Structures are given as structure tokens and as C-alpha cells.
Image (cartoon, coloured by chain):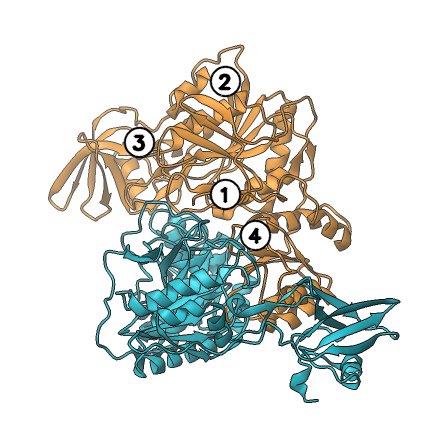
Chain colours: A cyan, B orange
Amino acid sequence: MTAETLPGYRGKLRELLTKAKVGVGDVVRVHTGGDSYEGTLLPRVENADEWHLVIKQKTGYNIGIAHADDLRVEKVGEAIKPEFRPPPLPPVKEGLPKVSIISTGGTIASRVDYVTGGVYAAMSSRDLFSIVPELADIAQIETDILYSVFSENINSDHWEGMAKRIAETIKKGADGVVITHGTDTMGYSTAALSLAVQNLPVPVIFVGSQRSSDRPSSDSATNLVAVVNAAAHAPFAEVALGMHEDTSDDSIIFHPGAKVRKCHSSARYAFQTVNASPIARYRSGKFEMIAEHYRPRQKSEPVIMNRFEKKVALLKFHPGFNPLIVDSFIDAGFRGIVFEGTGLGHVSEACYDAIGRAEKAGILMGMTSQCIWGRVNMNVYSMGRELTRRGVEPLGDMLPETALVKMMWSLGNTKTTEEARALLLTNVAGEYNDRTPYARREP
Amino acid sequence: MTAETLPGYRGKLRELLTKAKVGVGDVVRVHTGGDSYEGTLLPRVENADEWHLVIKQKTGYNIGIAHADDLRVEKVGEAIKPEFRPPPLPPVKEGLPKVSIISTGGTIASRVDYVTGGVYAAMSSRDLFSIVPELADIAQIETDILYSVFSENINSDHWEGMAKRIAETIKKGADGVVITHGTDTMGYSTAALSLAVQNLPVPVIFVGSQRSSDRPSSDSATNLVAVVNAAAHAPFAEVALGMHEDTSDDSIIFHPGAKVRKCHSSARYAFQTVNASPIARYRSGKFEMIAEHYRPRQKSEPVIMNRFEKKVALLKFHPGFNPLIVDSFIDAGFRGIVFEGTGLGHVSEACYDAIGRAEKAGILMGMTSQCIWGRVNMNVYSMGRELTRRGVEPLGDMLPETALVKMMWSLGNTKTTEEARALLLTNVAGEYNDRTPYARREP
């Protein structure tokens, strides 16, 4: 038996199953504690415990059975192939637009471990495609596993890699690119890629899922259909994020990459465009533009600026905020700090000295608002002017998260801090919106 | 001439004005650089520069005139009293409910410096009352200046003081209490006071203003009328925050103290109830309850629990988050850390070791979500379980800001970290809501 026959099984349980000559997919009868259970042996995921085997019963339910000294397994039927094996790819339809799906991980590429009830990153883009076969009628799909990373572990190395891969994919002739990504930090990544890949000829659409595809309320399929449609047909050549607009299953909204934020931990409509207008909507199978101004599809070569300075921090101010944090970043040789201040962009007087030291140490500093909506204005109150005098740059209506990414990028792609400051304050990818809409967007 | 005759004037300019025998309120003619200007001499605020005098011209415009060697001032008319002097308090109407307005600072208690265009904290509650004389028809008002602090400088010492003053005021027979507060950190303070003063017999309503009272769009007056009405008549005995509900001038909404957040840097409807229902609404002069469950007015003695541990931090996670922050808090002897993680409550693997060290150091840790809306759930993904295993407590649907305050309070009012942990996880003042509403609230 090779490793592949018993994926995920380790230790004693693996020995026992190997001795019984059973593999994943076989129908087995398991005897333990005087009871017995019949079903198809399922694989375990890599990081599962080694004390349970899992079978799918005829009823459809999966059960985990703990290892015990009296555990005995016998094979009663040969390899009814378990459902998680991806079916073959549907045939490619010539003449349809070419869309590349680049997978980086996340719930949209996850499945459930039935012993613990936890969700594990596991599926490939190929699997995704197999879940939504109708994608084959929308575009000629190429799938490409770039990473398999929980999005809380995404960092600027991944952004650099995504930028490279997006450019390569476009150069190979893709009419649109889809990036699957965990939702947790997807807003940071869309901001990063908005900056790192410029001069786009085609749309680059990030997509995730708030509910894994084994749940009836999963948004995987509807989101994928919409974003592949957008990648194939949308008139804009920008980095966007496509997810459910609201509680209905009918409307997918496309947010601008530098103006989007995850504003709900579990709802399918978690993402919101903040201080700007969404780009477009896909509803009832129809695509409609919302933004008045956008970069149209065009003949152009993508330009890569994908270096990010890692020594940049985002610090959220709060009552009792201890300025020692600022000092510890000075000591650690940090090059930039983005503050998430209160209201129009304030921190307490207790921070002024540390901020003055950071300025002397040559640290680039910027101010955003923890209010999230609205913009900073450091001229209204004298306390704001105390900060600008110490070199803290007001960052307009930029999201704190986007401001962090922008500062990492500005410092990464320039030679001096002063060049970085100028770049930080320049609108590159719609991260600033001079006319912040007064209208309310819902979280 | 006494100091009061020339408030805010210092140095050479003060000498010159003293010599010219003019005081604030006098009509003066100022000669400089060949020009001359006539108007009423206005006071400067305490922290203004010492190089400008300010006069109000007949046109109503205020101008600042810079000190110069040729500057000459002559008095042309006696003390037309400047408009900023508060008129006498209106007579108290016996029989009306007693409402105490405790002032702590903020825009609602601010005025403009016309030289710099900046806004300075300056007015007393007495001034406030004088701006809105109709308050005298609603209640017997007592005003009380506790602090005059920009709200970004509010810290737990102020919360302790507010708790004491609120209890004293109630014991003296107030039928309701209003606290004026800067909006920047008002949400943190309402959470703190929700915990620090328990067993309330009457409502305690925080109020601020997003536009200072010299602006036509000021919300000072409408907010004050509504909250004094609520303090006088509302049926609930809870800590609440009353501010504009939306863009109309007609509706003031009352948010629960532990579930409210400033979600816009400048709009008058900046505050939002998050993961809960607002308590009540005051619209078109009528008061209506919204919450189904609330603590009613009753005969009870307020109980003070007003100690807050200062060595607690709120850390917002982001891609590239450097765990050295956690280590620097361990080194500095911190007792608690609230994380603002991603999504359902995650941070990167890179943080696990530092979090393990913090656990060993006996630091109490909790997890909230930077999504703001929704709740953390650290059982869905294996990464969440890696954190709970290291002692990080999932804090449900508590706001990150409220969680910080709650942890400071839990550590401040218990003897051991384990007692504090138990208190942190107990719903004390509605900071947890088991049934987070799925319905959307707008930012």
C-alpha cells in the first residue's frame, strides 16, 4: 500500500488499516466496543489527529471512530470511489474567453474534517472547477495553484508572488484573471495587488467564500460563476473583489481593490466598498457597471512594482495607549508606522514625545481614522496640528488597512524615505477618493 | 488691568494693549502697515499663539492682525460686551425633573480660534446651557464641569472620576444625568461607565457634537435637547449615548453604552449600535423605546466598581504583523492583551510562539474581530483552536474597543488573573449579545 491509499492516516491506525488491506474508498466494517459500523473509508486531512478513522455511512452521514485496543476493521467491498475525488475536467469550448483561476487558499478552497468539525484548506482550483461545471460554458478555464495558505498567513512575499503570476498569466493571453483567496485578509491583498500590478489590460478579480462548499448556504458556486463572468466579459481592467452584495443569492458586487474591507465576520455580504462606489454588479446573470470612471480593457503590458517593505506597522490608538509600542518599533529599526487614530486623526498627548523620536529616527508616519468611514482632517483641531508638525502625514480617506499596504509598497519601491512619502501621498490606484461619498454604505 | 481684561493675550501684544488701556469687548482701531481696522477686541484662547490680536468687525467677520513694530491700537468705544460672554442662567422651574449635565470636554464644549481656524475646548456647561435656553423648559438643570479634556486624552483615570461623580450626582437626587464628552473616544467611555456604575436608578446619557456650535450645521442644540429629555423622562436606567440617527435633524438615537462605536469621522450620525439594537429614539419631540429588554427606572443605589488596570493593550493584527509587539508588552509587565484578529478571530502562525510566551507570563488574552460586525468563532478553523489552546479567549460579539475596556475593568476589580478571566467572559452590561442581529446597521 502506498501513502496515497491512506491519506491522512498515521501511527497505530495506519498500521491497523494497512494490515487489514483496506484503503480509502473501500467499504469497511469496523468493530469496536461490541458495536459495528459499515461505510466507505474516508481520507483524513494532513493536520488531523491520528486517533480517529472516518467512514461515510449509507445514510450519507460521516462518523469518526476512535482508535481502541479492540478496534477491528474488515473489508466488505472494493473501492466505491469517494465523492471528494474530483471528476475529470469538462472539455474546453474553443472560442470562449480565456480565464485563469489562480488559487491561493481560503474557505473557497477548503473542506471539512468530520471528526473535529473543523474546516481545512485542501481543495485545488481543479476541485473548485469540478464543483461548478457550468464555468466551462462561460470561459476556457485554466487553473493554477499558486499557494495553499490560510489568509491570516498571507504576507507581502505572497503579494510579490501573486503580482508576478498575474503578469505572467496575462502575458500568456488570459482575457481575465480570477484569484481565489481566504476572506480574512483579502482586502489587504486586493489593495496590495492594485498597487503592485499596474497598467492592466484585463480585469483581475479576487474572490473568496464565507461558507465552505459542503454547506447548503455556501457562496462558493454563485461567487465563482459571477467572477468568472466578470473576468471573461467585464469592461474594466482593474483589480476588484467580487462577493455577495446582500442577503440575497442573486447579486454579486465588485468592489474596487483599494477601497474594500471585510466588515462582517460571517455574513456572505461581508465585504463593503468604503468611501467610494462599487465598480459593478452581476445580478440575475446580467452584468452592469456602477462606477462612472474606470480603466477600460485595453491593449497594454502589465507593469510590475511588487516590492513591499516589511518593517511597517499599523498601530491602533486607544485610551491608555502606551507609547512604548512606538519606541519598540524605533528600536527594531522600523521604516514606517500607520496610525489608526480617533475621529479626524488624533492620538493622545502622551504619544507626542514618542512620535517626535520616531520622526527623528527617520520613520515615515501616516494617520488614518479608526472610524473607517469618512476622512482624516488634522487641521480642524490644534491636536491634529501637533501631529502634522511632528511629521505625521494625514492620509485622507484611505482605509487604515490600505494605508498600511500603501506605505509598505511606497517604501519598497523607492530609494529614500522622502521619495516614499511623496509616493504615499499620490493617488496611484484609487486608494484616495477626493470626493468621499456622503451616502451611507451598509456594513 | 487684571488678567481677565485681556484673556489669552501674552508677551509684547499684551504689553501694547495694556498701555493702550483697552480690554476685550472694547471697540478699537488698529493701525499697521499703513492700513487700519476697526472692531471689537476678542479674547484669545489659552493655547493660542501670542502674535495676533483678533477683532470682530462690524460686518461680523473676525480678523487676526499680526504683531508688528508699527502696530498701534487706540480705543474708540467702550466695552460693547462680546457675544461669547454667557447670559445669566434662566430661572429654574420648580416641579420639572432634575437633570445634571456633567461636562468633560469635546466639540460640544468648544469654540473656534479665528486666527488659526482651529477649534479649542473652552466652553463650560453653563455656556452650553446658555446656547440652548429651551432646556430650562424641560428640566431643572444643574451644570458641573468635571474635566475639560479633548477626548483623545481621556484615559481610565477620567473614567474613575466620572463614575464617582455620576454616583454622587444621583445620590443628590438627580432624575437623570447627561455627560458631555468629545466624540473621538466617547464609545470607549460609555463602555467603561456601563461597567463602572452598576445598579442604576436613572438614565446616564452621554452626548457629544460632531460640529461645533458656531457652525450652522451644528448638532449641539438638537442633541442636547434630546438627551436632556431622555435624562428627564426616559424609562430606562442604563448608560446610553444619544446622537443624530441619520442625515435628518429630526431623529436622535440612543445607543447602548457597551455596543456603540464611532463609525464616521465627520458625519453627525457617526455613532452606530453594533451587533445589537439601539435602546430608544427621540423624534419630532417624541420619545419611543426600541429595545425589548431594558433596565427600568427604579429605586436603587448605584454601585461603583471603578478600578481599571492600565497595563492592557489592544493590538490589531495585519499581514506582516510583527510579534515583537507582543514580546515588548511581556517585557513591560502588561497584564492583558486584546487582539483584533481577522475574520472569525485569527492571527498568523508567526504569532503563536509570542502568544505562548505571553500565556506563560500570565497575561490574560482575548480575541475580537477587526470586521467589527459579527462575532468571533475560534472553533471553525484549526488555526482558531491553535490560539484557544494557548489561552486566547474568544470574546463573542464584543466590540474590540469594548473588549479592551472590559479587560481593563476585569483586571482592575479582581485579585487574580483567573478571577479576571471569569469576569471578562461574563455578560455584565450587555457587552455580549448572544443573539447578534443578522439585520444590517448602516455606518
Q: Quadrant of the N terminus of chain B?
A: top left
- Same subunit under labels 3 and 4? yes
Which element carries disc 3, helix, strand or loop?
loop
- Same subunit under labels 4 and 2? yes
Q: Position of residue A441 (x, y in %)?
A: 38, 48
Instruction: Write down the residue under mark 3.
Output: B24
Which residue is nearer to you in this view: B117 or B42? B117
Instruction: Write down the residue under mark 4.
Output: B400
Which element carries disc 4, helix, strand or loop?
helix
Disc ID at residue B121: none
Q: Position of residue A211 (x, y in %)?
A: 54, 60
**Closer to the observer: label 4 or label 2?**
4
**How far is the residue under mark 1 from the one under mark 3?**
55 Å
**Closer to the observer: label 2 or label 3?**
2
Identity of the residue furthest to the bottom in this view:
A2
Q: Is residue A296 left or right of residue B11?
A: left
The answer to whether the residue labelled 2 contacts the one labelled 3, judged by CB atoms less than 8 Å apart, is: no
Can the viewer see residue A364? no
Q: Position of residue B3 (x, y in %)?
A: 39, 34
